[in-house]
Image (spheres, grey):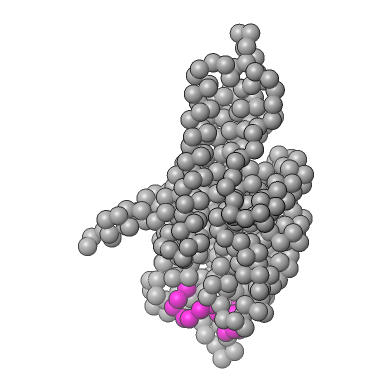
Amino acid sequence: MSDRDPQPVERQLPTEEARDLLALVRDIAQREIAPKAAEEEDEGRFPREIFTLLSESGLLGLPYDSEHGGGDQPYEVYLQVLEELAAARLTVGLGVSVHTLACYALATYGSEKQQAEHLPAMLGGGLLGAYALSEPSSGSDAASLRTKAVREVDGWVIDGTKAWITHGGIADFYTVMARTGEDGPRGITAFLVPGDAPGLSGAAPEKKMGMKGSPTAQVHLDGVRVPDDRRIGEEGQGFTIALAALDSGRLGIAACAIGLAQAALDEAVRYATQRRQFGRAIADFQGLRFMLADMATQIEAGRALYLAAARLRDAGRPFAKQAAMAKLHCTDAAMKVTTDAVQILGGYGYTADFPAERYMREAKVLQIVEGTNQIQRMVIARHLAGPEGR
């Protein structure tokens, strides 16, 4: 076996513009993101300058309308961009996915006036967003959230605490779900809250197993005042908005998972073709060859699954079940592939001198965020057999 770089991913892209876009993303990933990833993750440093570069390059609003600064790209293309970014550094790929999620409510349910006023800066003006749904006591059971928004003459006053917020404390805007009415899902409303609003503050970032460069923190809202023109959609429509956003967001997580798994496979192949034992490359041993084959198959299957869901979305067809399947399969595959990559590298895989151990630590969170994989199974089963207790 000869030393070689990993083969590039073979992609089916719908247009020449899309091919040029992926080439640009790959260039940015290889030149600006990947070389610093290990060091900055070890230091716990968030690469804000990379997000500024991505915004300037038109990569923070890809699936939204160009009328407001978006890229007019189908999800089929946008998700493959995420995959490339996540392969270079998950903090960046996931950060772009979360930013896109934070823009969804306004881009989809906002009035024309709201969109014209806020979306250009959100999609291409260098701003970074966060999505504030989860709370300390309501994660999977998001409909039980307690953050309250009370109407006043000139708008709303929001009080509460959000938890597990990616970009918490550093975001320029937050899409906040707050209770404005009765208990349960019908009493929730969505708001667009500026990151510098008086009364809004971020707690110290959580100390996490992986993705140390991506700040995850509680966000406190203490008498935060927002005018009514920052309410998104109708009163009581917030939970519907939140679930619709998560259907799309789960596809983003699936694409990021496949990017991470691809990076782990590439590292495993590189090592296995270079490492020699018993007079030959360890990639010549059937046990390792079969492991690599299984890893590659899981990745290709995951990529096909998230792209199939994306094409349904692009065609305007229902895709919630397929999004849950993609999130479930791709993140489970990423966990398995990254664990196998560590095994292939042996003792070296367990050290921070190689990226495999970081990939494995990062993969774990993808099985948890934007709906645990246990929740995804419930969503899939509900589509197949209807709700429980009928």
- Whether 227 is among the magenta residues is yes
Question: Which residue is at a point 69% across and 72% down the rendered structure image?
Answer: 120
Horizontal arrangement in the rendering, residue 40 relative to residue 356 (left or right): right
Residue 345 spot, x, y in % from top left: 60, 24
Looking at this view, is 341 or 27 the one in front? 27
Residue 201 seen from this side: no
Q: Which of 378 and 303 is in front in this view?
A: 303
Please determine whether, in this image, residue 255 is positioned above or below residue 163.
above
Q: Position of residue 154 (x, y in %)?
A: 59, 89
Q: Any magenta on residue 49? A: no
Give the vertical position of 128 relative to 285 (above or below): below
Q: Can residue 355 be seen in this view?
A: yes
**Where are the magenta residues, as a range?**
224-238
Residue lying furthest top:
279
Rendered position, 225 above or below 293: below
Seen from this angle, which residue lies furthest front? Answer: 16
Q: Where is residue 88 in the image (x, y as percent from the top left)?
A: 67, 43
Q: Nearer the viewer, residue 102 or 182?
A: 102
Residue at horizontal 30 percent and vertical 55 percent from the top: 384
Residue found farthest to the bottom: 153
Where's residue 208, x and y in %? Answer: 59, 46
